[in-house]
Amino acid sequence: MPVGTAGTVKAVHTRELEADIQAQIILGNTYHLYLRPGLEVLRQAGGLHRFNGWSKPILTDSGGYQVFSLAQSRKITEEGVTFKSHIDGSKHLFTPEGVMDIERTIGADIIMAFDECPPYPSTYAYAEQSMQLTHRWLKRCIERVDQTEPHYGYAQSLFPIVQGSTYKDLRAQSAEFIASCEREGNAIGGLSVGEPAEMMYEMTDHVNRILPRDKPRYLMGVGTPANILENIALGVDMFDCVMPTRNARNGMLFTTEGIINIRNEKWKSDFSPIDSGFPSYVSQFYSKAYLRHLVISKEILASQIASIHNLSFYLWLVGEARAQIQAGTFAGWKNRMVEVVSRRL
Amino acid sequence: MPVGTAGTVKAVHTRELEADIQAQIILGNTYHLYLRPGLEVLRQAGGLHRFNGWSKPILTDSGGYQVFSLAQSRKITEEGVTFKSHIDGSKHLFTPEGVMDIERTIGADIIMAFDECPPYPSTYAYAEQSMQLTHRWLKRCIERVDQTEPHYGYAQSLFPIVQGSTYKDLRAQSAEFIASCEREGNAIGGLSVGEPAEMMYEMTDHVNRILPRDKPRYLMGVGTPANILENIALGVDMFDCVMPTRNARNGMLFTTEGIINIRNEKWKSDFSPIDSGFPSYVSQFYSKAYLRHLVISKEILASQIASIHNLSFYLWLVGEARAQIQAGTFAGWKNRMVEVVSRRL
């Protein structure tokens, strides 16, 4: 899922998401949308789909992660989290019930439960206590969602989130509890927050042995192309990450040949396409030398081209993974591709 | 002509210039392109068209205007102008011959003569002396262009530039001289540099009575939609201006209803299209409220949408002007439109 933080996948037109990137679903950040444009505007617009013109599915996170990473003066209680806006310092309270109402108003098709995402590393005691809080909050989220109606005439699915930091027994406990809630999909949170990749894979593997196979398993906030391929091998079905767009804006390209830092002098007179290895108009129309010139000159078009390219590549990669799974050839392909996509050119 | 300063019309994809904006020609700035990506890269690419993928005509200015407005420590002599790059402080010399060679290497279809653009106001003595220098430089430009060949297999037309500041007799002298050079098109420079609009119109009118009617007359660096309509009435055929793109990036929109400052609170919940008054996908797909949200949130997509919209509007406006001229209804239409497009909404 391309990340559309404030109702826009940065530097990408809505029609480009559909036609070039061929995204099937995008993510919106509840924290950002709640602060700007705010619920009143979104309600009047008829929800986020109507506001930004994206007619395919949208998933919203719960805002919890941003409250912990962006907001100021946050304070966690049983009731919820109070915080100050990073924009104007105004004070707000997010509760499980309140966030469910907010996500209903945003109008996402998939709404994430309100959870606490403990930092890495966390002590066992903190991780356990935080997981228990997330579970109690989940019950309140479920109750609220089940007692309220969608605002705009289409269903909204609540996905609960497995926590438990890097402790296998906590992860197992959490996965059992999340699975027992029997919602339409399940998520794994609290990973890709600084722990080694091997530790992330160990947790994903462990959790996915418990979460039902016949429902989507969504690993939140992951990751590099290699991370995604390894986690697909472990049974993950859905991903979101700012990496393809954020790194694009810094001149880092993910390609079918490996990773390119387009600022590098070596691309100055390389007039070959950005990436001719998969069918994408933008990646084949513009050359490496031209994109490098735009990045060096701080031109907006640089972010536009690189964002479309990276997102197209990510979507192509997961599409290929699906085709390889269906063909029964995934394992060998994955091992070769992990090497290729991790290579620095 | 949309302005593509450093080989990119800011925030606009090449295909959008063709399909959405329907530009027939774009402008490149010699000063910027000479400094970045530099002539070596452009030569290796096979010229600017090959470098940025724009296959329709390109016009390049001579760099003179930027040398005076952007560069540091500039010094004018009979030979040319020495200046320091605004990027890295490196020292350069632009001469009429050198600039012709540079524009040949960039590969523009229309190359502008190297001139001095005197500031407003200028004394009569300075304006006259500067005009004489521009005329002497023009002779050298013509000689160089006529003695050299295009680099990439297609013709390159040199347009000379009328100067003379705001003095009618100097403008007349300059126009006579420029017309006598009998090039394929002629330009009017040194206007829209701070003088009142009425004074600009007086000069354009005066000059256009002398410049041949059967060749394109190009008014450089103009202007607002009203400026453009008034100058079309005075016989101008070609324009370039950064206004549609620069103002777009600041949230100012030119529309068929008037001028919109999209930051204004009044657009917060206005879900009507940016402009439904002319056929443009982007202007009709996105709402005023959504664009306002993007501008307030400093999202890159704001610049993208507003730039496409403003350029589409400018190109639609001049297309309409042409149709009205052909229908013999231009004068009345122009007077009504000048009022509409000058209105602040």
Image (spheres, coloured by chain):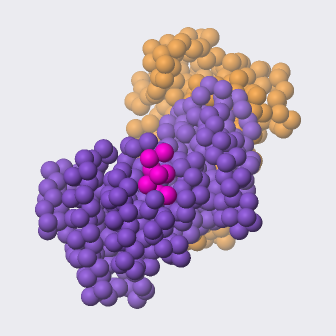
Chain colours: A purple, B orange
Compared across the picture, whether A168 is left or right of A270 comes to left
Q: Magenta includes A144?
A: no
Task: Say above or below: B220 vs B319.
Answer: above
Q: Magenta includes A201?
A: yes
Question: Which residue is farthest front?
Answer: A169
Q: Nearer the viewer, residue A147 or B270?
A: A147
Image point (44%, 62%), residue name: A207
Quadrant position of residue B271: bottom left
Task: Say above or below: B281 vs A254.
Answer: below
Image point (44%, 42%), residue name: A196
Q: Give residue A120's position: percent from left, percent from top.
A: 32, 45
Quadrant position of residue B47: top right
Image point (23%, 70%), residue name: A137
* Quarter of the C terminus of chain A within the rendering: top right
Q: Nearer the viewer, residue B2 or B123?
A: B2
Q: Give residue A162's position: percent from left, percent from top.
A: 36, 64
Q: Give residue A219's position: percent from left, percent from top.
A: 46, 60
Q: Give residue A131's position: percent from left, percent from top.
A: 27, 61
Name the dominant secondary structure of the magenta segment: helix
Q: Nearer the viewer, residue A204 or A57?
A: A204
Task: Say above or below: B269 vs B114.
Answer: below
**How many labels, in total?**
0
Compared across the picture, whether A303 is left or right of A77 comes to right
Task: Say above or below: B342 vs A298.
Answer: below
Question: Which residue is farthest right?
Answer: B153
Compared across the picture, whether A206 is left or right of A33 comes to right
Whether residue B303 can be seen here: no
Q: Which residues are magenta?
A: A198-205
Quadrant position of residue A115: bottom left
Whether residue B140 can be seen here: yes
Image point (22%, 52%), residue name: A126
